[in-house]
Image (cartoon, grey):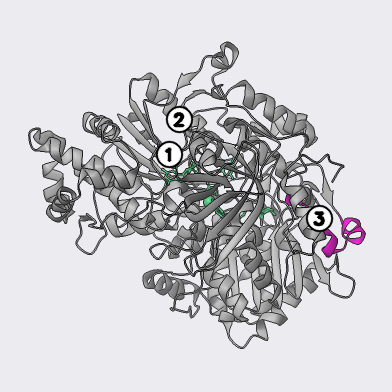
Amino acid sequence: MGDREFFEGDAEIQRQEAAAAGEPLEPRVGPVPKGPPKSKPYTHPAAGWGAAKAVTEFLVDEREVVVGSLEMFKMNQEDSHGFDCPGCAWPDTKGLALDLCENGIKHTSWEMTGKRVTREFFEQHTVSELFEWNDHDLEAQGRLTEPMVYDPETDHYVPISWADAFKLFGDTVRALENPNQASYYTSGRLGNEASFLYSLMARELGTNNQPDCANMCTEAGSRAMLVSLGTGKATVDLKDWESADAVFVMGINAASNAPRMLTPLAQLYREGKQLVHINPQVEAGATRTIIPHEILAMATFHATPTSNLNIQPRSAGDMALMRGIAKATLEMAKTDWRAVDGQFLERCTSGYEEYRRLVEATSWDEIVHQSGVAKEDILKAAAIYREADRSIITWGLGVNQHEHAVDTIREIINVLLLRGNIGREGAGAAPNRGHSNVQGNRTCGVTNAPSKEFLDKLAEVCGIDPPYEEGMDVIGTVEAMDRGDIKVFVGMSGNFALSSPDTRFTYASLRKVDLTVYVSTKLNRSHIVHGKRALILPCLGRTEKDVQAAGLQRISVEDGDSMVHLSQGNRQPASPHLLSEPAVIAGLARAALPDSGTPWEWYVEDYDRIRDTMAKVLYGFEDFNRRVRQPMGFRIEQPARERVFLTPSGRAEFSHAPLPDVVPRDGRLVLGAMRSHDQWNTTIYTDNDRYRGIHNLRTLVFMNGDDMSERGIEEFQPTVITAHAKDGTERTLKGFLAVKHDIPRGVAAGYMPELNQLISISDYSAQSDQPLMKQLNVTIEQDA
Ligand SMILES: Nc1nc2c(c(=O)[nH]1)N[C@H]1C(S)=C(S)[C@@H](COP(=O)(O)OP(=O)(O)OC[C@H]3O[C@@H](n4cnc5c(=O)[nH]c(N)nc54)[C@H](O)[C@@H]3O)O[C@H]1N2
Ligand SMILES: Nc1nc2c(c(=O)[nH]1)N[C@H]1C(S)=C(S)[C@@H](COP(=O)(O)OP(=O)(O)OC[C@H]3O[C@@H](n4cnc5c(=O)[nH]c(N)nc54)[C@H](O)[C@@H]3O)O[C@H]1N2
Ligand SMILES: [Mo]
C-alpha cells in the first residue's frame, strides 16, 4: 500500500477526517498518488510515443516486459490460434499483423501478471482489513489461485476444495423456496460457450434473473434499434467503415476506450472524408493520432488529424442536435430533391410524413436551446451529412447512459433513414460496444428478458422447461437483495459491487444475501463486500491454455460487427487449481441440479459439443463449428444490413418523440461519470488521465471555468457535490477537487466508479432501465 504524502484539500484527507469523526465513508478506488495533482493540457497526438512509453512503464511495473511483448503478437490474429483481446469489442482487422493498442496491452498484461494471491495472503489479512484497501491495491495483488470460502468466525477467507465449493452452492440453491431467489450476473468477459451454459443453467433452475453489464452499458441502443430497425446490432462492418464518406462519432472517448477506431478514422481523413465529433469534451481521439502500427509514422512523429468538425453539445443535447440536422436536411430537400432518399423513404420506411411534420413543428430556437449548439454549427454538420453519399453514425456511453437515450438513438436512426443510410455499403448505425464479448453474451442467451421464440427453441433442443416470465436486471437485483428477496447471488466475471450505482446501498444489499459466489481472475471489491457466506472461485483468463479431456480448447466471441471468431490462450495457467469458466459452470450446475439430463460434464470435455448444441438453438449459428474455424470466423447475418426490417410493419420505423427538456436549472449542473485513460472499468491502473492532462488525481470534477468562478471555486479546490435524485433523496460527496476543463457551461464530469456513490438506485431511465450514469442532477459548491 505504501506511504504517502498528503496534499492540501485532497480527498484522502477528507476521508480520514470523516472516518475519525465516525462517518462511514467508502475506501478510495484509485491507488495512492505518487505526487501532488497536476493538470496541464495535453498537446500531443493520440497513440504514438506517449502510448509506447506508457506501455513500457506498465510492463516493467507488472514484471512482464519480455513475455508480455512476445505474447502481444498473438493477439487478434486472423488464423484463430491467438486470443481475442479482452480490451474492447472493436472488430479485428484482416491482414493487420499488429492490431493492438496501448490499452489492450495494459489490459492483457494485467491478466498475465506474475503476481499471485495465495492462501497465505488471505491468512495474513482479515476481510475487514481488506475493506480498507483501495481497489487498485486489491487487484494489484495479482491472480487468484485457488477456491476460497469466507469464514465468519475469523473474518478470513480460507481454502475450500472445488467439490465442497460446488456442494455449498448446490445445497443453498436447492434449499430455496423458489428459483427466483437467486440472481446470476455476467459481465461481458465471458465467452460464447460459457454464456450459453450459464444462461442454460439459470433457466434449467427456473429463473430469468440474469442481470448483465449491458444493463448499465448498451441496453438503450439495443432497444432503440430493435424498434426502429428490427435488429439490436450494428448494421455496418469494418468494410463499411473503410468506404464511408462521413463518420459522426457521438459520446465516445475513442483514444482511450476504443483505440483501434482511430485507425479507420485517420485513414478516412487522409482520403478526404469527413469526420464529425459530437461530445461535450474534445477528446484526444477528436484531434489527431499516430496510427499505432505505422512504424514510419512512429519514427517521424507524423500525426494524422482525426476530425473535421467538433461540436460540443450540452449533456443530453444530442437528440436536439440530431433533430436540427434533420430539420436542415428537410429544408434543403425543398429545393434539392437529392437531400433525402425519396425512393428509400417510400419503399422501406414507415412514419416519414409524421416525422417530417414533427421536425417542421420543432423551432430552431428550441433546437438551439436544448442542444446547446449554435445554429451555424448545426448547419455545418448538416452540410457534411448532405454532401456525403454514405454516412455512418457511431455512438457510445455519452449517448446510452441518459434518461432519454432510447428516443435519442431512435432520432439518430431517423436522421440515417432520411438519406437512406441503412443497408448500404459505407453507411449505417454503429453502436460502440464495451466489454469484448458483451454482444456475444446476449446473442448466446444471457438476458433477463428472453424472447418466447428463443425459449421455445431452448426447450425443444435442450429438453428443459424454461421460465417465460421476465427476470431481474441489475437495478432489480439490487433492490430485491435489499428487500431480502434474493438469497443467492452469482457474479460470473465482473465487479458487481463497484460497477453498480448507489455504492452504499448496493454494498448494504449485497451484505443481506445468504450466499455470494464470485467467479473471477483477480481480487476485487465484490469479494470483500459479500453475503453472509461467500465463495471466490478463480478461473482461467483468456490468455491461458484451456485443456480438457479432448485436448486444448478454444472459445468463441462476437465483436461489435457481429463477427464470431475463435480465441485460444497459449500461456500456462496462473495456477494449477484454476478451472475454465465452462468447467466452473458445469460444476455449479451439477451440484444444484443433480438429476439434470443436460450432459454438463460431457460438454466440458470438448467445447465443440457445446457449439453443436448452440448451432441448433441460436439464430444464425448453423454449422457453427465449421464456420467459426474459417479465417476471421463468420458474420451473423444482420437482416437490416440487407434492408430486411424485422419490425411489425416490415419497414424501418421513424420515431416521433418530442424533444425532452434537458437544460439544468436553479444553478444545477449535469454530472457524468466516465473512464480515465488509465483504467478499465473498475480496474484502475494509475491515477493519471494522460489525454486530459491529469496526473495523480482521480477524485476530481471537471468544470467549465465560468461555472467555477460563479461558485467561487478555484483550480484544485475541494468541492461538495450534492446529487438530487428523482426520488427526492440526496447524496453528497466531499473533497473532490475542481479542475478547469474545456466543457460547456452546466456540464461537469468525473470518473466512474468513484462517482457511483452519487447515483441513487432510483435514478434510472424509464426507457432503457439503465442507471443515469451520465446525467446526474447536481449542485457543486466549494468546500468551505
Ligand atoms: N481502456 C479502456 N477501454 C474500455 C473501457 C475502459 O474502461 N478502459 N471500458 C469498456 C466498456 S465496458 C465500455 S462500455 C466502453 C466505454 O467507452 P465510452 O463510451 O468512451 O465511455 P466513457 O468514458 O464512459 O464516456 C464516453 C464519453 O461520453 C461523453 N459524454 C458524456 N455525456 C455526453 C452527452 O450528453 N453527449 C455526448 N455526445 N457525449 C457525452 C464524455 O465526454 C466521454 O467522452 O469502453 C470499453 N473499452
Ligand atoms: N458511474 C458509472 N458506472 C458504470 C459505468 C459508467 O460509465 N459510469 N459503466 C458501466 C459499464 S458500461 C459497465 S460494462 C460496467 C462494468 O462492470 P463489470 O463488468 O462488472 O466490471 P469490470 O470492472 O469490468 O470487472 C472487473 C473484474 O472482472 C474480473 N475478470 C477479469 N477478467 C476475467 C475473466 O476472464 N473471467 C472472469 N470470470 N473474470 C474476469 C476480474 O476479477 C476483475 O476484477 O460498469 C458500469 N458502471
Ligand atoms: Mo460497458
Front residue (pair 680, 465): 680
Q: Is residue 402 above or below residue 293?
A: below
Element type at mark 3: loop
Q: Dot 3, crowdedness within 10 Å: few (<14), some or many (≥20)?
A: many
In the image: residue 763, left or right of residue 143:
left
Q: Looking at this rendering, what residue extends furthest in the bottom direction?
A: 177
Q: Which secondary structure, mark 2?
A: helix
Give 172 or 697, whichever is nearer the viewer.
697
Image spot of residue 575 (x, y percent): 81, 52
Instruction: Inspect the image, locate mark 2, and give the three-letter code of the amino acid beneath it.
Output: Ala
Please tell me which residue is depicted at 25% across the width and 55% down the height of the picture. Answer: 645
Task: Choose mark 2 or mark 1, whichever is in front.
Answer: 1
Q: Residues within 10 Å of mark 2 (few under 14, many from 20)?
A: many
Which is more toward the observer, 80 or 243?
243
Question: Is residue 701 one of those drawn in magenta?
Answer: no
Mark sitting on residue 7:
none
Q: Is residue 144 left or right of residue 280?
A: right
Of the two numbered discs 1 and 3 in the rendering, the one whose residue sits closer to the viewer: 1
The quadrant in which residue 723 appears is bottom right
State the separation of the CA atoms marked 3 and 2.
42 Å
The residue to which callout 3 is attached is 145
| Residue 279 image label | 1
| Sequence-earlier tag: 1 or 3 | 3
Q: Would you say the residues marked 2 and 1 are in contact, meaning their CB atoms lie under 8 Å apart?
A: yes
Percent across and percent down for residue 476 are 52, 72
Q: Which residue is drawn at the image coordinates 34% and 51% (left, top)?
A: 409
Label 1 CB-ligand 1 distance < 8 A: yes
Magenta range is 118-136
Residue 93 appears in the rendering: no
